[in-house]
Amino acid sequence: MRKTLLTVSIISLAYLDSWAQKEVVNPVKPEDPVRIGLKFGLPNIAGLNVEYVTPWLNGRLAPTADFIIIPINYEDEGSTASAGGSFEMRFSYLELGLNYYFTKPGRGFYGNISYGRLDFFTDISGWEDPSQNPEERLEKLDMTFNNLNLKIGARWGGTFYFRPEIGLAFMSAPNGVSYTVIHPDGTIETVNNDSSGYFGVMPLINLGFGIAF
């Protein structure tokens, strides 16, 4: 019995040593490790996606990043019958994470863990309302959300590829929400809500495509 256990132990150690040397000395180099493409979905709406498949862990580990910024500045002279003026809106999203491919180096199904930051700002303080009886309206809104994302996805194709993803985002609002309101009597109020205790879960769905090289 002892001889059998000793033999199994020696074989196991030899196999682990061989595997470790292969991983460290001869890492697998994936084909077309650099991927640049576009993603559409939630919460990023639409944006640039970049991925690099490293040779480590048998070519299954890939850092990834998503980025988008949408600035909107609108001006309208207006008329006596309609509103006029200008307003500003800005939406941005940044996500940094890691993909781990389950079966093939840089291909097929993978899991993802990532950190995201979503910022939304709007300002309509320059927008004039010709109404005789103005109603209460929101002038400015500034929101920031941090989220931890857990996703599963797949990368199909070669030089040109297609990439669907689904998952969950665990979101928090560490900086709170601030906004400015004009009341019917003309008074202006700026409110800063402490939303540091906010926590929510949001479904994620993305469809992407791009080029690998």
Image (cartoon, rainbow, N blue to C red):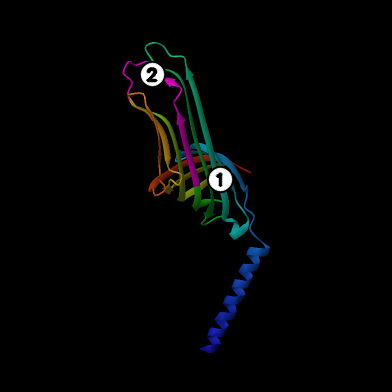
In the image, residue 130 sits, relative to residue 192, either above or below, namely above
Give the residue at x 56% y 45%. Answer: 65
Say which mark, if any, is on residue 195: none
Q: Nearer the viewer, residue 5 or 137?
A: 137
Where does the C terminus fall, quadrant-wise? top right
Left or right position of 88 against 13: left
> What's under tag 2, amino acid-wise?
Asp
Residue that numbered label 1 is attached to = 65
Give the residue at x 63% y 58%. Answer: 28
Q: Nearer the viewer, residue 49 or 128?
A: 128
In the image, residue 106 sits, relative to residue 70, either above or below, namely below
Give the residue at x 40% y 17%. Answer: 83
Residue 105 visible somewhere in the drawing: no
Give the residue at x 43% y 21%. Answer: 127
> What's under tag 1, amino acid-wise?
Ala
Task: Tell me residue 84's x, y (percent).
Answer: 43, 17
State which region is magenta.
116-135
Task: Tell me residue 118's x, y (percent).
Answer: 48, 41
For disc 2, the neighbor class at 10 Å (few under 14, some 14 to 19, many from 20) is: some
In the image, residue 86 sits, relative to residue 41, either above or below, namely above
Residue that numbered label 2 is attached to = 129
Q: Nearer the viewer, residue 71 or 174?
A: 174
**Disc 1 on helix, strand or loop?**
strand
Most extreme residue toward the top is 80
Task: Tell me residue 137's x, y (percent).
Answer: 36, 27
**Disc 2 on helix, strand or loop?**
loop
| Quadrant of residue 203 within the rendered picture | top left
Of marks 2 and 1, which one's residue comes earlier in the chain?
A: 1
